[in-house]
Image: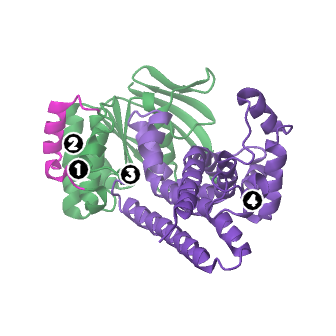
Amino acid sequence: MLSPAEWGVVALSLKVGGVAISCSLPIAFALAYLLARQNFAGKVVLDGLIHLPLVLPPVVTGWLLLLAFAPDGPIGGMLMRATGGTVLFRWTGAAISAAVMALPLMVRAMRLSIEAVDRRLESAARTLGAGRWRVFRTITLPLSLPGLIAGGVLGFARALGEFGATITFVSNVPGETQTLPLAIYSKLQVPGSDAAVFRLACVSVLLSLGALIASEILTRRAGRGIHVL
Amino acid sequence: MFFEVDVERQVGEAWVACRFSAPDGLTVLFGPSGAGKTSTLHMIAGLLTPSRGRIVVHDRVLFDSEARIDVPPERRGVGYVFQEARLFPHMRVAANLHYGAGEKHGEDFERLTRVLGIAHLLDRWPRTLSGGEARRVAIARALLSDPDFLLLDEPLSSLDKARREEIMRVIERVRDDLCIPILMVTHDHDEAKRLASQIVAL
């Protein structure tokens, strides 16, 4: 089975992916809601910006993150002044790049499910005395929950597989930023580590497959009107 | 007059203009399809904003384009039974009924579900209901939100003869026993003649 160091890699990957998705989930949902429901100047530009990491070479995304989060960069500077720390070469940085790369997938899935919510149900709820917030909480959110969950799980799977932006942005530091794909890449550079590569690749396949199946099952259950949570 | 309505707006390609006053009791808005009957109900409920006009119900101004009054739908005291039942698919019948009522209407709830013959449906999901059952649930849900007036949009359409008779009796009971003023839209002459205390032709 896996060696302690390899278990460490798996645990780090899950931590980075988990933190990346739980922090970006509300942002993704807000963006999806905005794109699905509002018309505003610059909507096309916002849509494009969100989707950019999907089509940009990951090394470019990583480099842009590096510029922004460097201690003399716009966001990195603020962080430095506020906390005295940096996300460079830290697992927090790996989580940021994973979140940015997963965001377009999450927003797409969520946007589709919000657009699929029958707005006539929302107006019915209004006539029954519910204000906008209650309508959102009791109608829009539960009915778009399948997409919210599917988007989250899909994003999680994507975050686990994140490679190019992460290695560019926060480098490949064992125990700190060396997630599964980076560990596999490092092993590939060392002659005679085929067995370790095989083991880590198996874990990678299992995790990704598990996430996809979970997303599918949850979506179907929610689609049948069964409460998911 | 209970209802004083004078509204107009563009709806798709058509220009809808509607002006009438009506006492309490049951008023039928009668006219061919495409005359803007549903749009008028939507404007009264606050789901569609008139480009010009004034809506007063029971001396309360709900909309006035000149005075810039536009009461949001949730505060208009409206009970709206749409042409489609619009039951919330992720809630059981009981939760649908409670949506506008909260938990406070214990007695009303029992009585109404019995009168409408839906007491045995409370644990069902909306997608398992027949057309007639769904419509009765929708009527009960609107009534339980304690409305000052009721809007009914083609409440008898796409039902077989027996179901129509059943819903017709329900509407008569709401009109006579609960004494809630009703605006009802239909394009069926017989329905209009039987139920209406006043008919407004559009």
Label 2 element class: helix
Label 3 element class: loop
What is the three-letter code of the residue carrying label 1? Answer: Met
Q: Chain of mark 3?
A: B
Find the distance from the CA under tag 2 to the CA under tag 1: 6 Å
Q: Which residue is mark 2?
A: B172
Image vertical order of residue A132 relative to residue B188, above or below: above
What is the three-letter code of the residue carrying label 2? Answer: Glu
Same chain? Circles 4 and 1: no
What is the three-letter code of the residue carrying label 3? Answer: Arg
Find the distance from the CA under tag 1 to the CA under tag 3: 20 Å
Q: Which residue is mark 4?
A: A167
| Mark closer to the observer (2, 3) | 3
Find the distance from the CA under tag 4 to the CA under tag 2: 73 Å
Give the residue at x 38% y 55%. Answer: B84
Give the drawing colour for chain B: green
- Magenta stretch encompasses residue B17: no
Give the drawing colour for chain A: purple
Q: Quadrant of residue A83?
A: top right
Q: Which residue is mark 1?
A: B168
Label 4 element class: helix
Same chain? Circles 2 and 3: yes
